Image (spheres, rainbow, N blue to C red):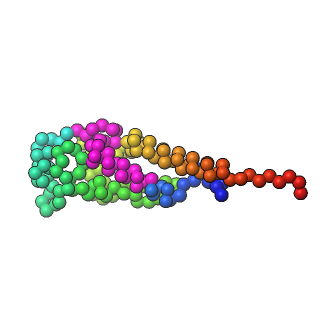
Amino acid sequence: MVKLADIPKKTPQFWYALSEKVCNAIRDRVQKEHKNANGETFSNYSEWYANLKSQRKAVYRGGSQASTSTVPDMTLTGKTMADLKTFEANNNGATLGWIGLQAGIVESLHNHKNYRIVNLNGDPFAKKEMDMIMKALEDDADKKIKAYCQTPTIIKIGA
């Protein structure tokens, strides 16, 4: 039985699942659509870097290069986008992002050309990702409202 007070509440499982969907949406936007957090197509790599990347010579010595794309996809070794993950989910929300070296890479890219994977100032997500978050919140509330409205109200007359 759904109580009216439970409608706005979310579970850690809800927040975790939503956070993982956001992580996947960010990866798709960056690696498949080649767009930054502002919805702009990434600026082209320099001719020099694109040439190195296409020849598998852009990565440090001994490193493994995951992408040879000359179209900016923010994927050289594949580690930065693979390390985007949910760190915590509780009743109030979820925390996602990067730690360590990969966090430093995201931060350094933020001020390089227009290579913002996420915005570090203000709203971190692209409009499409924010819309997805809002839709998930609305859908969850709608589902709970419908369940609440299905609960029978019993009124007794007399003793």
- Pinpoint residue 29: horizontal percent, then vertical percent: 32, 45
Is residue 71 visible in the rendered image? The answer is yes
Residue 123 falls within the magenta-colored stretch: no
Query: Split into 4 quadrants, where in the image is the N terminus?
Result: bottom right
Say whether residue 10 is left or right of residue 120: right
Q: Residue at x 36, y 48 (%)?
A: 25
Up-down relation of residue 112 to residue 155 (above or below): above
- Pinpoint residue 87: horizontal percent, then vertical percent: 40, 59
The image quarter in which residue 72 lies: top left
Q: Magenta span covers which residues? A: 18-43
Say whether residue 98 is left or right of residue 48: right
Q: Nearer the viewer, residue 53 or 135?
A: 135
Say whether residue 54 is left or right of residue 124: left
Q: Residue at x 34, y 42 (%)?
A: 37
Query: Split into 4 quadrants, where in the image is the C terminus?
Result: bottom right
Q: Nearer the viewer, residue 102 or 157?
A: 157
Q: Nearer the viewer, residue 151 or 92?
A: 151
How many labels were placed on the picture?
0
- Pinpoint residue 79: horizontal percent, then vertical percent: 26, 57
Instruction: Looking at this view, name the residue that lies furthest to the top.
Output: 40
Q: Nearer the viewer, residue 75 or 2?
A: 2
- Pinpoint residue 92: horizontal percent, then vertical percent: 52, 54
